[in-house]
Image (spheres, rainbow, N blue to C red):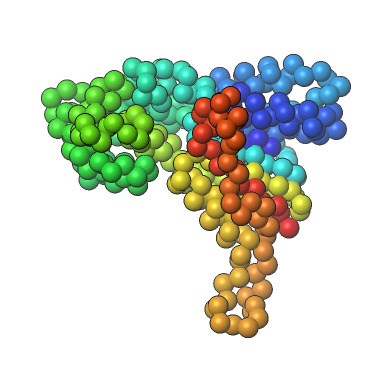
Amino acid sequence: MDATLGFAGHSREAAKLLGEEGTLIGIDQDEVALASSASTLEAIPVCKRPRLELLRGNFGDLDELLVSAEVPGIDAILFDLGVSSVQIDTPSRGFSFKENSPLDMRMDPGKQTLTAQEIIETYTAADLTRIIRAYSDEKWASRIADFIVKARETETIETSEQLVEIIKAAIPASARRAGGHPAKRTFQALRIEVNSELTVLRDGLDAAVRWLNPGGRIAVISYHSLEDRIVKDTFAAFANRCDCPPDLPVCMCGKKPVLDIVTRKPILPTPEEIERNPRARSAKLRVAIKR
């Protein structure tokens, strides 16, 4: 199962390994991505193509999706987290701080109502500070929040270009010279808030472990420390389930480990991979096996 199908880059390679005897389940909440990936996967010759089950939805609703598809269990699960290329590269979606576009950032516009613009226009300075600091570790979160609140008193903040200029004004010039684009962290925080990404990730990982068959593998690629911490902690919780007092000589709770962790430290991209795909620069891969 590819829980974050996107343009089927991972799934295309998985299909080659599965062959006609296997089943490939792909999940994505983006209609454009699903249509594109279906074309890509159906182009594989029938004699080499696994049975395809492409499902529209969010991996936070994994239980509901897999029950509806009558899936009995899964041997391998991949999560490639964060915003997808199709979303970044479509200016009208509002994910990129490099393009002037409406402040949307919804991964599933058909079902979601909260947008980044609504957050910018309605959240208090305290709430803006909280999400920017918590979801991006932005040093200047409080100043950025104050500048947003002040700016919206005189004009409606509707576009990414407007927001970028406000963020630049809030961050001192000396601080803008290092650390990449000054708006990067704030845009990440807004995207996480709009899509409840961290809650969805926790729910999706818990469900995925339940659906794994014994001996099955779960692999997760994350792109920032908040995601990686959730993956690491989730794997550790399933690998170390005993909650007996540490000074107890033997386990009395009877809770057995569910996962064996394969990657004690995350696998990082090689320089060659980063050269081929600069967006892989911050990627971290963690893998575990179901007992």
Residue closer to the observer: 148 or 211: 148
Q: Quadrant of the N terminus?
A: top right
Q: Is residue 289 visible?
A: yes
Residue under the point 34% across and 20% down: 102
On the image, which quarter does residue 243 sit in? bottom right
Judge from the rendering whether residue 68 lies leftward or rightward of residue 147; answer left or right: right
Q: Quadrant of the C terminus?
A: bottom right
Look at the picture and state if 32 lies above or below 273: above
Residue closer to the observer: 61 or 291: 291
Look at the picture and state if 259 lies above or below 50: below
Residue under the point 25% across and 41% down: 140
Relative image position of residue 213 (x, y in whole percent): 75, 50
Q: How many marks?
A: 0
Q: Is residue 34 visible?
A: no
Look at the picture and state if 103 lies above or below 257: above
| Residue, far front | 271
On the image, which quarter does residue 283 sit in? top right
Residue under the point 37% across and 21% down: 98
Relative image position of residue 211 (x, y in whole percent): 68, 48
Relative image position of residue 272 (x, y in whole percent): 60, 29
Relative image position of residue 53 (x, y in whole percent): 71, 30
Residue under the point 55% across and 49% down: 231
Judge from the rendering whether residue 80 lies leftward or rightward of residue 190; answer left or right: right
Look at the picture and state if 263 lies above or below 144: below
